[in-house]
Amino acid sequence: MSTGPIWVGRSPRPAPRYPITVFLWPLLAVLAIATVLVWMYRPGSWTAYDPNAKPRPVADRGPLDEDEQKTIELYKNARPSVVHVTRLSVQRDFSTMNLEQIPEGTGSGFIWDDAGHVVTNYHVVRGADACQVALPDDQTPYNASVVGAFPDKDMAVLWIQAPKTKLQPIQIGRSSNLQVGQKAFAIGNPFGLDQSLTTGIVSALDREINAVTGRPIKGVIQTNAAINPGNSGGPLLDSGGLLIGMTTAIVSPSGASAGIGFAIPVDEINRYVPEIIKHGKVTRPGLGVQLATDPKAARQLGAESGDVVRSVVKDGPAAKAGIRTAWRDVDGIHADVIVSLNDEPIQKANDLYSLMEKYHVGDTVKLTVERDGERRDVSVTLGAIDN
């Protein structure tokens, strides 16, 4: 009897047989690829090094464009007038107990005259224990003293004792005839990098920014010439290389240039810098009042617009005219609201400061004041306010 396996159903099929070419062609393809790879990567066939490497021929670009040549010449002429300003703080080294001057911040400035006066932004030197000014191509910075400042316009004047031969005053231009679209050039020390030139145009005129004191600076120049931290206090020039403004601020969420920079007009600089040099300060006409900074303050008191008087200087011009410091009683808060100056309406907060700039100490002006819904006119003789 058979003891082999028992198959149920169909008989088992024999294993299939394939022709040898089925395996031959894939094998030949693999060998071909391997041969190519070996040839490509054989020693000395393909390498990053070439012992016969030589410099490539240099193409002659020809002369620079006329516009480029003018920019280069402008930079060469203006560069000697631009300085690097360093704000210093005095700290004690507790290991030696010696006082040391520590750099606290940097900015730019420009030489005003050959007597050693340097103009920069007030915020560049604000709160400094000492300052240093570095001239172009001079390895040794000069100790600088602060002659005076006008914080409301973000201006300051320094003085250095340097040889006249090293002092090249910047050429002064005019800002009253500027036009949107004309070229603008900024020279300064962004991020502490000396003597950087950026170019752009005058993007807009009559902008308004706030000084560090909170007061508005009107008539400001807007430019898209790149301005970064460290450019503050440096010159803004026109295509003739003349000073048209002093770079002072940027609008940027990141703190770096975003194409919106501002400069104080040179007409303002030329007006106030001589006064700072003469007296160490700027004397302006004033009312002897402190105004509320909240732009909604006037409406909260029931006035359509105007500047709210928060406090009044005792025996000052406004106090003598009957204007009061804000007060509170059982009915709430009361304050005087100045709604016009010589019939010029005050449209928004701090407009009064701008209107005052056209008057002088000793002038008598008419103020329209609203108190608890009632208006009256008062005469005020402007007094002197030092900055």
Image: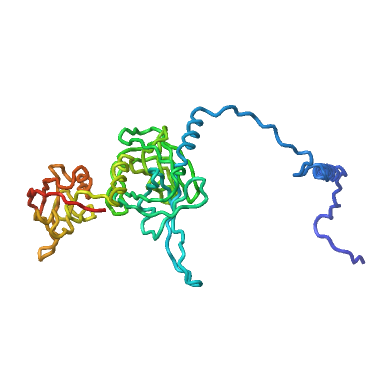
Q: Nearer the viewer, residue 6 or 89?
A: 89
Res. 250 visible in picture = no
Residue in view at x 36 percent, y 35 percent: 173
- Location of residue 184 in the rendering, given as x and y in whole percent from the top left corner: 41, 36
Q: From the viewer's perspective, is 162 left or right of 301? A: right
Residue in view at x 82 percent, y 43 percent: 44
Q: From the viewer's perspective, is 336 left or right of 159? A: left
Res. 104 visible in picture = yes
- Location of residue 148 in the rendering, given as x and y in whole percent from the top left corner: 32, 52
- Location of residue 323 in the rendering, given as x and y in whole percent from the top left corner: 11, 55
Residue in view at x 20 percent, y 42 percent: 358
Quarter of the figure with residue 355? top left
- Location of residue 75 in the rendering, given as x and y in whole percent from the top left corner: 48, 37
Q: Nearer the viewer, residue 154 or 56?
A: 154
Question: Looking at the image, which residue sits at the far right?
Answer: 1
Q: Quadrant of the N terminus?
A: bottom right
Q: Nearer the viewer, residue 222 or 74?
A: 74
Q: How many marks?
A: 0
